[in-house]
Amino acid sequence: MATEPEREAEAPIHGDILESILSHVPLIDLAPVLHVSKSWNRAASSSLAHLNPIKPWLMVYTHTSRTPHVITTHAYDPRSRAWVEIREPSSARPTVASLRSSPSSLLYMLSSTAFAFSFDPIHLTWHHADAPRVCRTDPIVALVGHHIVVAGGTCEFEDDPLAVEMYDLRTRTWETCQSMPAILKGSTTSTWLSVAVQGHRMHVTEKISGVTHSFDPHTNTWQGPYDLRPDQSVYSSITGTLRDRLILAGLIGEEADVKGVKLWEARGELGSESKLGCEEMCEMPKEMVKKLKGEAGWVSSISMWTMGDSVYMYNPSEPEWVISCEMVAGIWKWESVENEAVREGGRLQRMVVGVGEVRMEDLQKGMRENRNFALKQRKS
């Protein structure tokens, strides 16, 4: 085996040239490069830091509706402009129930008897807990600090459809919380509500009206309502956070005639007495709105996932295209990405979407734990 000096001598490419070359190498192929030599490790690290940094991955999971819920994972790496299929041992993921996702990188499975969840970027580790005391079928779920908040979505036989519970990651116990505001009684499921986490608060927004309430796990209290709908032309909206800023994506027009999609930033702090408002950030290009509509030509609502400076949006009814938006040097850059999971036949399966702030350490750990990362395609 060659010594370190010998490996250095065998590698005539150094410095800026090597960094430039490595900036074009897909992220999953950079992991072995870090072990070539110290100079290659430095070049790869510098390339990631300055030339082509790592960006949040879009994670798309398709799975069968019946046990054992076979799950296929496709991830879009915007740095490499490529889809990656992540293959893992069948025993790596629990099969408590159907897979679900929530803001940030939280994945979970919830049944009447058990609760399993994972929040690392590529879900190498799963945690197990007892089920909440209240039976739920379609709740809103969010990781807020060291609490996982589970609200609404209760089974029909439960007394309180607005029931809220939270799981403490430190004590591994459930706590009953103040119920959701009564005004949300007719729309307590994830179908009708959007959830965003900003700092130590969870914001719950009614998609049609834009009415928003804020929950603080530390004080166990709800505040609001706040009206986040920018204007009456917005018929459906959804919230998210970009670097702790609350943003809102709104569909303009009506379901059968979508005029456009815009992003706004909420001004003022929810949970305070300050005046709230929305400032327009950017508008989706018309050709991408057309892709969002799909063949049906209509959009009842959209799903949005945010992390870092990146926004991903798609139409759950027509998921063939994902529209991404990223702030780069003060400019919003838009991109339409063909959904690889749908292209490979996932259109007829249940689809769950999330995001992950994947680091090189996560990929290396995944490779050590028998995950296989297969590059699917490159985008020009």
Image (cartoon, rainbow, N blue to C red):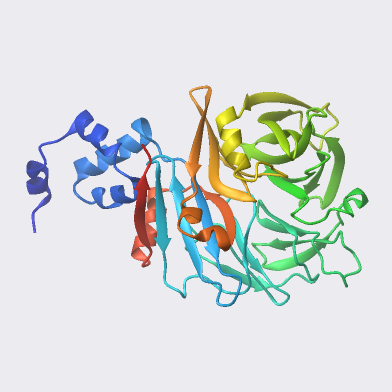
Residue 121 visible, this angle = no
Left or right of residue 53: residue 128:
right
**Going 38% across and 59% down the picture, which residue do you hit?**
365
Instruction: Please state the horizontal and vertical placement of residue 148, each as a whole percent of the image.
Output: 69, 58
Residue at screen point 67% across, 66% down: 171
The quarter in which the N terminus is drawn is bottom left
Res. 357 in view: yes
Q: How many marks?
A: 0
Observer-nearest of 7 and 205: 205
What x and y, as percent, mark residue 303?
65, 46
Q: Residue at x 40, y 41 (%)?
A: 81
Residue 279 falls left or right of residue 10: right
The residue nearer to you, when weighing 97 against 359, is: 97
Residue 89 placement: quadrant: bottom left
Q: What residue lies at 42% left-to-right and 67% top-to-bottom?
A: 88
Foreground pick, 3 / 299: 299
